[in-house]
Image (cartoon, grey):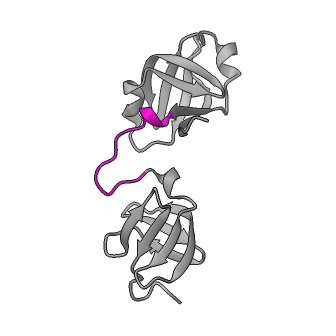
Amino acid sequence: MADFFKIGTITGTHGLNGRLRVYPTTDDITRFERLKSVYVGDKVYSISGVGYNKAFVLLSLQGIDTIEAAEKLKRAEIRIDRADALPLGEGEYYAKDLYGIKVVTDLGEELGVLSDIIQTGANDVYAVGNLLLPAIKQCILNVDIEQRKMTVHLLEGLRE
């Protein structure tokens, strides 16, 4: 089974020639320019053009050249294979790999699993049960994706 990343959702059409208006769900919307193809549903489409309009990506796919064909794809997810994902820097992780990871303190206390990632602008915040942990190096000590374990230091004031 392939491992996919969602990078956008088709919200509508743009013009009469099958161009799709895509709401991007990726940190770098210019990444669409570096892709050769994307998955829409179970089908692979080659990208024939990329443009931008405000916060949206305008995507042209080979074989989708009428407004009627484009309308059929409305609300579909745009996905890519993990192999086409943007490379990570040191200490960076794909959000989808963090969901469900076991979280323990540096003292060995099990806190639960990471259930949500809240983007605040300054830094992400990880929800683990009723705890909210800032994704900063003083709090997140180690992340082991292969072992599915995150070690954290509970800063003063994080617990009730």
Q: Main secondary structure of the magenta part?
A: loop
Nearest the camera: 24 or 117?
117
Q: Residue furthest left?
A: 90
Q: What is the x, y in percent for residue 69?
A: 67, 14
Magenta segment: does it hold 90?
A: yes
Q: Quadrant of residue 67?
A: top right
Residue in the picture at 53% in, 63% down:
101
Image vertical order of residue 131 relative to residue 23, above or below: below
Residue in the picture at 54% in, 79% down:
110
User: Which segment is the magenta one?
Assistant: 81-93
Image vertical order of residue 14 relative to residue 113, above or below: above
Residue in the picture at 48% in, 66% down:
149
Judge left or right: residue 128 versus residue 155: right
Count numbered badges in the picture: 0
Residue in the picture at 46% in, 38% down:
55
Nearest the camera: 85 or 149?
149
Magenta segment: does it hold 36?
A: no
Q: What is the x, y in percent for residue 97?
A: 50, 53
Q: What is the x, y in percent for residue 115?
A: 59, 64
Q: What is the x, y in percent for residue 104?
A: 48, 76
Image vertical order of residue 120 relative to residue 51, above or below: below
Q: Residue furthest front?
A: 147
Judge left or right: residue 146 versus residue 2: left
